[in-house]
Image: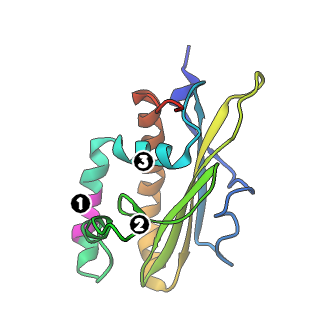
Amino acid sequence: MPNIYHFATPVALPPQSGVARMYPSTDLADAYSICLPPGTSNDPEALARFIFSHQPSWIAWLTNLRDMIVAGLGLKTAKNLALLAGDTQADRLGIFKVYSRSATEIILGEDDKHLDFRLSVLCTPIQTQESHRQLVLSTVVHCHNRLGRAYLTVIAPFHRRVVKASLVRAGRVGWPLAQ
């Protein structure tokens, strides 16, 4: 019998998410949902940290490859962003800037000359007997120019695999418990 906590599925962008109306137009908008087991933390920031710290190792390899390619284009690399994360004055979660926090959602992202993006980690606040709590990871991207659109065309299929694999891996490792 399949474990419902180990599957991430594409869903519509949640209308209650802060990223749903982030940009007047988007070049990419997607969302993936995974069921959270009973007793899992309700803190979207703790869940986001958990997801990013338990990603499959092939994602680091892809990130390094991406960095080698885009460095010559003058775009921000993960290494550049990691240096910013070391600045104790900056409000960052890993390589991502924190744009907002609430009891149910954290919005992260970055702006660059070719595109801006935001990602949301949104938790449903309660679990009922009829349904499981959900965690939805949503991404929206707004491109500024042709470089952004070309970059997005190349990266989008990888992005979708990375998001889905990150959620599945976190589910298999075992989500952090509520405090």
Q: Which dot marks residue 64? A: 1
Q: Reading the chain from its start, which is encountered first: label 2 or label 3?
A: 3
Name the residue nearer the viewer: 152 or 67: 67
Q: Which residues are magenta?
A: 63-68
**Mark with earlier residue (1, 3):** 3
Residue 49 badge: 3
Q: Is residue 46 magenta?
A: no
Discs 1, 2 touching: Cβ within 8 Å:
no
Q: Is residue 65 magenta?
A: yes
Q: Amino acid at mark 3?
A: Arg
Assign a secondary structure to mark 2.
helix
Which of these two is toward me, 149 or 101? 101
Q: Residue at x 68, y 57 (%)?
A: 17
Q: Nearer the viewer, residue 156 or 79?
A: 79
Task: Give residue 81's position: percent from left, percent from top.
Answer: 31, 69
**Residue at the extreme top of the image, as rendered:** 1
Q: Give the residue drawn at x 35%, y 40%.
A: 54
Quadrant of the rendered structure where residue 34 is? top right
Q: Amino acid at mark 2?
A: Val
- What's the mark number on residue 154? 2
Residue at mark 1 to residue at mark 2: CA–CA distance: 16 Å
Q: Amino acid type of disc 1?
A: Asn
Name the element at disc 1.
helix
Vertical arrangement, residue 133 with respect to residue 12, above or below = above
Answer with left or right where residue 44 lies relative to residue 71: right
Task: Residue 21 in the image: state x and y as whole percent.
Answer: 70, 69
Q: Secondary structure at mark 3?
A: helix
Examine the rendered structure and indicate whether residue 161 appears above or below residue 83: above
Q: Left or right of 76: which side holds 121?
A: right
Q: In the figure, residue 8 lies in which quadrant?
A: top right
Quarter holding the N terminus? top right
